[in-house]
Image (tube, rainbow, N blue to C red):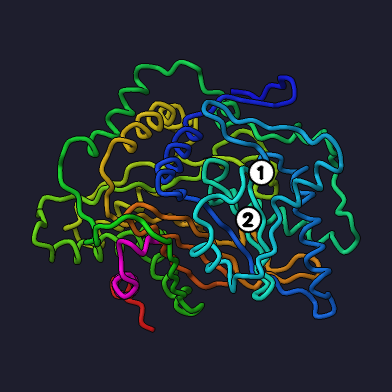
Amino acid sequence: MSWTNEGAYWRRPLDCHDKLFQSIAAAGAPLGREHWLMAGWLRLIFPSAVESAVREQRLRAVWSAMRLLHPDIALTLQANEKQYKPLANDEALRQWTDDTFRVETGACSVDELFSRQLKVAPSPYATCHWVPVCSEVAIVSPHWRIDGRGLLMLLHSFMDLLARSATLPVPTAVAVGAEATNLVPTLDTVIGVPEIPKEEWVRKADDMLAPFLDGSPAIGLPITPALPRDTVRMETVFPKAVTIALREACRARGLRLTAALHASLVQETTRYYSQGATADPAAKYKSWAAFDLRKYCPSSFDNNRSSTAHAASLRLVALPLITDPTASWDAMAAAFQAYYTQSLALADSDALFVRVPYVEKATSMLAKGAPTTEPNLSNLGVMEEYLQPSYGDVEVRNAALAVQMLSPQLYVHAWSWGGELRVSICYNEAFYHEQFVREWLEGLEANMLKNLDVTT
């Protein structure tokens, strides 16, 4: 699945991850929307002496340079392959920048832009959006191009260039027309996956998906049946002192904060589910959790966080997470701790090889299955592991990530920034009222504080 140069294009076949996210995005096409369209953004503080026109000029120049360093932001998705057309000259780069760099004077924030204006990807390429009224810059892309951590790495690369943009044009080591050498190889290529999987891997993939196909009940939240409308994002911030106390409480119990948060998520969801008229006492919590695979890659471009060369890529897998929601909080948290700390390294497991038939089968299953309503959790960890508080003369005041949701689920992201734990929920307003989501989130927060014996 390597890139090959054929005529005017570079192309490569779609891998299992490409096909999965292609299928997920396409599900919203009949509604004129795009499921799991992603946005990552930063709030920037420029020196007061830097005029607004100069800020825009610098941001635009940086986005133009990003095309040379990360050409995957300009590849296109076809039915069976990804294609990239190299730049012919400087004018082609200028035209691409005109098409993909947007100054959003009609939005008051990236949150508002993402929720109310971006129904589908605004371009076949990734786009950069500058909202001057709130000094926020965002990168928007379909999920088939990049994952969440990759988007954070891409924002770091953007800011690294911005730090060097006081003198324009922004210097890069890549010439226009030669940027295709920076196209990112697939995960299969990087780790050397055989073209034909072993039968044992296929059997293991079937076993992993069996609980989703056996007809057994699953818990979920009550929804209002409707056609999808806009995605809304809600966030709660744990103050720094509370975040420190939560981490210390987790450390004393031998837990990661992710395991504790997920146990509380299940308990709070169970509380709502058990009140329903159709609640089944045998129902399980059936969901998925994403694992970042970069640290398992042999390539230094992937497993070295100081390198962003492979930022624009899919380097993750979502593994099944199934548990008895009636178990105690301590039992669930311990089980989730073991789950989240499992090693997928090639020396310890064949999971990276099983991943291919597993993702292929999951793609087919999800395309045919009915929507579920259990909340999902994805923890992005400490943002400062990917982003700096400042770059040159520009300060980063805040960072956030969101996904468009067309399914009737709450998509919960967690991360810390500036020492504060943030829990962010993306949901479709057609299925949930804001007050319901707010109360569920408050219940999640209270549950975790109680079970970790943390007072505020």
Q: In the displayed structure, does residue 233 sit left or right of residue 452? A: right
Magenta residues span: 427-441
Residue at the spot 27% in from the left edge and 59% down from the top edge: 266
Q: CA distance from mark 2 to mark 1?
A: 10 Å
428 is within the stretch colored magenta? yes
Image height of 415 relative to 16, above or below:
below
The circle drawn on residue 73 is: 1
Judging by the rendered image, the residue that carries numbered circle 2 is 139
Q: Is residue 349 visible from the viewing direction of this image? A: no
Which residue is the extreme one toward the bottom?
456
Residue under the point 45% across and 15% down? 196
- Report the side of 183 relative to 404 (left or right): right
The structure residue drawn at horizontal position 35% and vertical position 29%, both measured from the top left corner, is 361
Picture layout, residue 396 above or below residue 92: below
| Amino acid bearing label 1 | Ile
Give x and y (percent) for residue 328: 20, 61
Q: Secondary structure at mark 1?
A: helix
Mark 1: few, some, or many residues within 10 Å (few <14, many ≥20)? many
| Quadrant housing the C terminus | bottom left
Circles 2, 1 touching at the beta carbon (< 8 Å): yes
x then y, percent, for residue 215: 16, 39
Q: Say few, some or many: other residues with alpha carbon within 10 Å of mark 2 (under 14 / 14 to 19 / 20 or more).
A: many
Q: Earlier in the sequence, mark 2 or mark 1?
A: 1
